[in-house]
Structures are given as C-alpha cells and as structure tokens.
Image (tube, helix red, strand yellow):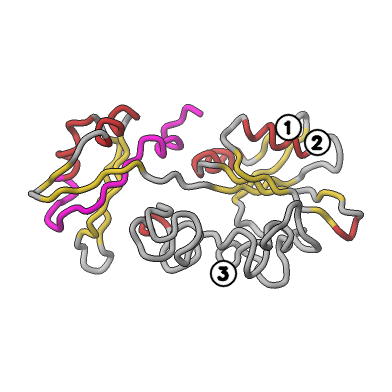
Amino acid sequence: MGDNRFDDEDRKLFVGGLPQDCSQDDLKQYLSKYGEMDRVQLKTDYETGRSRGFAFVVFADVAGMEAALADEHEINGKRFTAKKAVTKPGKIYVGRLPSDGLTDDDIKGYFETHGTVTEFIRPIDRANNNQPKNFAFITFEKEAVCKQLIQMGTLDINGHEVMIKEANSNPRDGGAGGGRGGGRGGYGGGYGGQQQQSWGGQGGYGGAQGGYGGYGGGQQSGYDAYGAQSGGYGGGGGGYGGGGYGGY
C-alpha cells in the first residue's frame, strides 16, 4: 500500500538472547553492517531499566533484514538469535452496510484488494428471518492494513459509503443472535452475547469458551508479549503465538 508507516512488519526483525551488557547503541552499531535501519528498540524492564535480553529492529528495506537473517550473530562474546518478527493480525468493524445492493462476496472481495483477509463475519438477525445485519467484522493477516483503513474512516464500495472502525468497538446493534458459521463457539456465540461482550475477556467475542479467544487478554500483551510465558495476541498462553513470539 506504499506507506512505510504501515508496511514495516515486512522489514521487522526479532532479536533474542542478548547479553545484559548489550545496549541499544551496541546492537544498532552491530546490525548496521546489514543495512540502514529505521528503528531499533531494545526492550527494558520498566522499573530497573535493565535489558530484558531482546529487541525489535526495523530495517529500511527487506534486503537488510534478509541479510541479517542469513547470518549467525555474536555480540559482546555471546551468541544471539535473529528471526523475522511474527506478523500480528488485526480486525476492523465495518458499519452502515446496506440491506441490499452489497453481497457478502462484494464486501469481502473489496477488502481483499487491500490485504489478505483471513476471516469475514457478518452476523445475522434471528429476530428478522435471519437477515444479515448492517455491520461486519473483517480480520486481516496484517494489523498494518487495519490501521490504514481505520485512518480512512469511510470507504465507498460499489456506490455505498461504509464506516470503518477498530474492531474493539462495541456496536450498538451487536446483540440478538449469532453470526454466520459455528463450531466450538465460533461465530454462533453471538456478538455482544450475554457472557462476554468485549474483546479481551477470557472468551472474547462469541462466548466464554469459543469466539476469538480474547483479544490481547492474559498478563502481557503488546510488544512485551514477545518471549513471555503467557499473554500475547490472544492471551493466557493460548491465542496467537501463545508462549513464544506471540504478539508484539
């Protein structure tokens, strides 16, 4: 999509097993032989300021990251690892969908032109002969795509203006029945159902056991979930990445 603010996931490196005496400047100087870098972020303990032994590095281009991946590394006498950072998925809420004139295939096909769509959900209204509701949730392979779409705010799909928001918005008409699909709670638990109405509970959208499994629940989410034993995207040791490099 041509904006480096949003495509840095393709150039991001996870660096782990760093020695305690390795500073951010040390790491930047060491990795500079592979290419120009946009950002080096050594993770530190909030209270003590001590290194947590891992970092994220965004190279200016993919070639620099690939060069670093192809090599073995040692700094201050200690070997460390470098891996491509796990891509974090993202979800958007699409509102103001018309009752007719736009099929589910039309909507999904439009958003697939922006990035890889991994899940499309448009809930149905059981109180109205299972008619589709006027909103949908779309999951992209890369969160960066979601960020750009959210900044746009509205989009025109075949002459219909639709609204784009973060998926953690609790839509006003999000109750009364499940969505399309099912299995293990899946979509059928109901968006905004009785048990869990927000992203980030134990079960997330769709009920206590099924649904999305919690959007960033657990003890640690955000960048700090890399290497943590719990947390990550999906939280609690499960979710996306679980106890490994999940979420960042």
Q: As drawn, which residue projects farthest toward the left?
A: 77
In this rendered view, identify the residue nearer to me: 236 or 94. 236
- Indicate which label's residue lies in the foreground, 2 or 1: 2
Q: Does residue 177 lie above or below 95 as drawn? A: below
Q: Of marks 1 and 3, which one's residue comes earlier in the chain? A: 1
Look at mark 2 in the image and give the residue it sits on.
Answer: 102
Amino acid type indicated by mark 1: Ile
The percent position of residue 202, horizontal first and vertical second, equals: 56, 69
Disc 3 + disc 2, Cβ < 8 Å: no
Q: Position of residue 186 (x, y in %)?
A: 68, 58
Disc 3 secondary structure class: loop
Q: Are the residues at dot 2 and dot 1 in contact (C-beta closer than 8 Å)?
A: yes
Instruction: Choose mark 3 or mark 2, whichever is in front.
Output: 3
Q: Residue at x 70, y 58 (%)?
A: 183
Q: Residue at x 60, y 43 (%)?
A: 118
Q: Residue furthest front?
A: 183
Q: Which amino acid does the dot numbered 3 rest on?
A: Gln
Residue at image mark 3: 202
* 211 versus 166 height, above or below: below
- Mark 2 neighbour class, 10 Å CA radius: few under 14, some 14 to 19, many 20 or more: some
